[in-house]
Amino acid sequence: MANIKISKGWEIPENQVTPESVYINRRKFIKELGIAGAGALSLFGTNACAQDSRVAKQLEPYRAQILDVKKNEEFTVKRKQTDEIIAATYNNFYEFTSSKSTVWRRVEKFKTRPWEIEISGLVEKPMTLDVDDLIKQMPLEERIYRFRCVETWAMVVPWIGFPMKALLDKVQPKSDAKYVRMTTFMDPDVATQQNNFRLPWPYVEGLTLAEAMNDLTLLVVGIYGHILPPQHGAPIRLIVPWKYGFKSIKSIVSIELTDKKPRNFWNVILPREYGFEANVNPNVPHPRWSQASEWMIPTRGKKYPTQIYNGYGEFVAHLY
């Protein structure tokens, strides 16, 4: 008998294309903030996606630090996996720059070892852990996830990490904990955008405790079989694949459990545009453009229909 594979909700055939419908208005936002915001969709130039030998050279020390883990076959995507060089040259990392195509150059002086993470707040066992000690203690695996930016571009990425639930179980949340507040590093000498005092540094993000405990929610320490390069949010970042990418905070230094809803970075800046939930939803447009379709970098001209919860509804729809 032939094996019959029932496709998951996020497994979208490559030939499903929708008409162009995305519109943009970034000048007003740039003028107001002095940077390109989370909603600003930059033109994706040819040089930005080229398999630049300089990028390959930059990745060499990280590629040498292999994370030998098993692939979780539950999570796969029919779309072609994004090329590693392209993924390394197209990043939002506002601490360093608003230009996605130059982040990889701006992070060269960013030191991600040694690195400690503090877990505190409404927990029975608060602790501070060295990231490499944490990696040794956690159940690492590879998961191939779709990644959807609020700017309407998308990737398919093989992340290496562990469920956030594994760490939260370790610190034992108290009964009155309702939210998880995460904070990134603060070092304006290296991350020069942090010198922009009009913005609410350091970057803060939050999830409900139920979202944080969901099996999809991943604390990531590697990518493409090796440890994270700095442009991807080394040494540890969050991935919540059913939410827009700005929810997946990078370079985490603290995780705090609280009974109060955190105000995230973009919600503070533009509360009418960036809410706390930020679930991928084609039926809810951003105030300045449609979310009905997306494009896979680097092929800007081809559009695909956006899936509710980025296609992961079977795992998370019950939360809402």
Image (cartoon, rainbow, N blue to C red):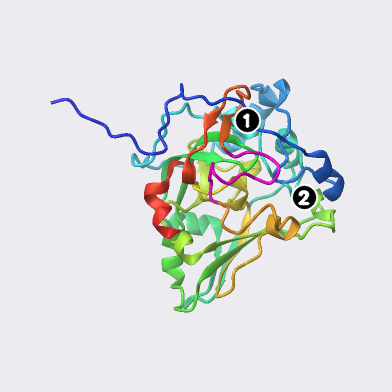
Image quarter (top left, top right, bottom left or bottom right) of the C terminus: bottom left
Q: Magenta span covers which residues?
A: 279-291
Q: Return the residue nearer the eye: 278 or 296.
A: 278
Picture residue at 50% right of the left edge, 46% below the top: 241
Left of 31 or right of it: where is 250? left
Q: Return the residue nearer the eye: 300 or 45.
A: 300
Q: Is residue 215 visible?
A: no
What percent of the width, then of the height, locates residue 181?
59, 65
Residue assigned mark 1: 21
What percent of the width, then of the height, locates residue 293?
56, 33
Image quarter (top left, top right, bottom left or bottom right) of the N terminus: top left
Q: Amino acid at mark 1?
A: Ser
Q: Amino acid at mark 2?
A: Ala
Picture residue at 43% right of the left edge, 68% below the top: 170
**SS category of the residue bearing label 1:** loop
* Category of crowding for the residue at label 1, using alpha-carbon neighbours closer than 10 angstroms: few (below 14), some (14–19), many (at least 20): few
As drawn, 193 above or below 85: below
Q: Return the residue nearer the eye: 288 or 111.
A: 288
